Image: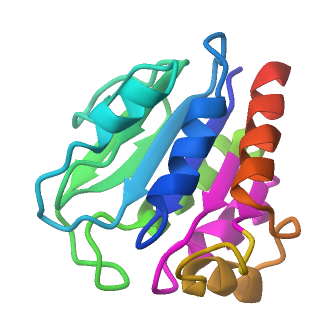
Amino acid sequence: MSAIIVIAASAGGLDPLLQIITALPPACRASVFVVQHIGANRSILPDILGWNGSLPAAFAQHGEAIEPGRVYVAPPDHHMRLRFGGVILDQGIKVHFARPAADPLFVSAAETYGKRVIGIVLSGGNSDGAEGMRAITAHGGLGLVQDLTEALHPEMPLAALRYDHPEPPLTAVRLAERVAAHCAKF
């Protein structure tokens, strides 16, 4: 079974996100899900990730089947959740003043895929991802956060550390290495 990688990024999170996506080998069988706090604004994030990485990237579609070796990005103004084998999108209430938000994705991934989940919280200015990180580690998954001194806005990684006890914080380079190495296991 392939790994499920869920990544939360907000202000200052694009560069570390690119480092992680770029590090994924072409043979990576993980399914990668990205939430960036973009609100209802237009986004070209899937294009940017596709241009820089070796895995195809696109906005997730409601009801879409999850495939290995792909990057799914939450579309503007939609929460992305996972169910076994598929993606669910909704425009439910904002979580931490954001839609899309990381917690709905992280919690649903943890509840559905348990120990197969790797959760990553990158730079951002609120506490989104903390509750989801706690769910991931409680279900046996791996929790990773960006180094607080490196994050341009350390509030999101700090909240994840305070709310849960994931692995020690890592620089973006070390996060990328860790995730790429984990990809090789599946």
Residue placed most toward the observer, 17 or 158: 17
Q: Which residue is drawn at 80% across and 62% down?
A: 170
The C terminus, quarter of image: top right
* Residue 182 placement, left or right of 68: right
- The percent position of residue 91, horizontal first and vertical second, equals 17, 62
| Location of residue 148 with respect to 106 vertically, above or below | below
- The percent position of residue 6, horizontal first and vertical second, equals 56, 49
The image quarter in which residue 52 lies:
top left
| Location of residue 47 with respect to 35 vertically, above or below | above
- The percent position of residue 119, horizontal first and vertical second, equals 65, 55
| Location of residue 109 with respect to 99 vertically, above or below | above
Is 121 colored magenta in this rendering? yes
Residue placed most toward the observer, 157 or 92: 157
* Residue 111 placement, left or right of 59: right
Q: Which residue is drawn at 12% across and 64% down?
A: 40
- The percent position of residue 180, horizontal first and vertical second, equals 75, 31
Is 163 colored magenta in this rendering? no
- Image mark count: 0
The colour style of the image is rainbow
Q: Is residue 108 visible?
A: no
Residue placed most toward the observer, 128 or 15: 15
The image quarter in which residue 148 lies:
bottom right
Residue placed most toward the observer, 29 or 105: 29
**Residue sticking out furthest to the top:** 27
The image quarter in which residue 131 lies:
bottom right
Residues rendered magenta in the picture:
118-146
The N terminus, quarter of image: top right
Q: Which residue is drawn at 67% across and 19% down?
A: 25
